[in-house]
Image (spheres, rainbow, N blue to C red):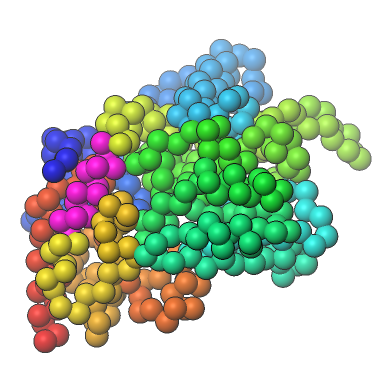
Amino acid sequence: MSLLDPAIRADFPALEQRIRGRAPAYLDSACTTLRAQPVIDAMVKLQRGPLGCHGRSAHSFGRATSQAYEGARETLQGFIGAREAREIVFVRNTTEAINLVAWSYPWRPGDTVLTTDLEHNSNLLPWQRLARQGRVVHRVLRVDPTRGIDLDALKKRLVGVRMLALPHVSNLFGLRFPIAEVVRLAHEAGAAVLVDGAQAVATHPVDVAALGVDFYAFSFHKMFGPGGGGVLYGRAQQLETLRPFIAGGGTVESATYDDARFEPLPMRLEAGVGNYEAVAGGAAAVHYLQRIGQQRLHRHVVELNRIATQGLSRVGRVEVLGPPDPELRGGILSFYVRGMDSEGLARMLDHSAGIMVRHGKLCVHAWFDAQRVPDAIRASFSAYNTPDEVKRFVRTVAGGVDMIG
């Protein structure tokens, strides 16, 4: 058994609250993690300090803000192994990062974008919209939810593809995709690769240069950081091809009434005043994660998943989605109970036991509808969860199942 010290819970102020007299059991970290105190401290420090306009103002407050902002960029560069700081573009979240690529890429008539059938809506809807406008052709690769991606099938489907967009870790099943092998096959076929890394960065060390990806997107709020901040990584030569998604303040060197000359990377892709607080919080989240250790965190959530999976295996009517082995699902456990409404079960968990889970189609509507699978419950684990919480979760689900007979 490899578990983190429960004392780590003291780093998360939200857990000091009591809900109907008991400590909350927050099992919804795949949606958003709780904020760590060092992250909150970093954001408050920035707000209380000399805060000005990054990149615009030459006065001391402006210079201090620029120093903090660019320092955070270097922190994020090191965190994911980017070769250059200019390859780190600050965005609001993974969704914006994917849309930035989708709407800014230099598409040619007939270009094909290939995604998997397990995509979060954020990595599906932009490509659908582009396809409806006739700017790309969108194709879907089916993935076995228990075994993962078939590389031989992928190789065949990559013929004629301009862009492959896929998750690093599925938010539905917790499956991790073999990104290095996928990238090799895609590049051999002449396709660029965009990876949705939202579910990976907290528990899997990422080295974008070693993986060879063209674009990699993630959000701070999935890694103990704040909402409203994230990163689009792009290889410099790929970023250079992007037309600014949003044009305006901070993106141009000069402008006339007829034309404009844009700043170099990454400023040309970061229009308007940035979310300085979120960027500071994101950098602090990196330091916090590095202190815990991503691999230690991964072992912790896998062990909690194992406890939950073994417990639910003894509960009738429960159907676990994805691989049977918790090791292959990481910190994600999605399931449904035959004959029981998922929303009702989620409310019962919350109201009767203070256990917070996600329910529904989990932003993967297309897969649920295609497979005709009932809405699911997703329990997702993180650093602050304990075996006792997981066992309480299992007991409460079992009690709910007993109620329906």
Residue plotted at (43% across, 20% down): 49
The x and y percentages for residue 282 are 43, 34
**Residue 318: which quarter of the image?**
bottom left
Q: Main SS type for the magenta part?
A: helix
Q: Would you say residue 303 sits in the magenta stretch?
A: yes
Query: Residue placed farthest to the front in the image?
Result: 152
Residue lying farthest to the right in this orientation: 258
Q: Is residue 67 left or right of residue 346?
A: right
Which of the pair 177/370 is nearer the observer? Answer: 177
Q: How many marks?
A: 0
Where residue 332 appears, as percent x and y from the top left, is: 31, 56
Residue nearest the observer in this picture, 92 or 89: 89
Residue 119 vs 302, above or below: the answer is below
- 76 sits left or right of 12 in the view: right
- Residue at (53%, 33%) from the top-left corner? 210
Question: What residue occupies the far top of the structure in this picture?
Answer: 60
The reply to whether residue 121 is visible in this rendering is no
Q: Quadrant of residue 317?
A: bottom left
Residue 167 visible in the snapshot: yes
Range of magenta residues: 296-308
Image quadrant containing the N terminus: top left
On the rendered structure, is 233 left or right of 175?
Answer: right
Seen at 50% across and 60% down, the residue is: 150
Instruction: Give coordinates of residue 116: x percent, y percent.
Output: 54, 62
Quadrant containing the C terminus in the rendered view: bottom left
Task: Identify which residue is drawn at 25% across, 82% down.
Answer: 338
**Residue 310 position within the rendered picture, expressed as x and y whole percent measured from the top left:** 15, 62
Left or right: residue 285 versus residue 365 is: left
- Quadrant in the picture for residue 401: bottom left
Q: Is residue 214 magenta?
A: no
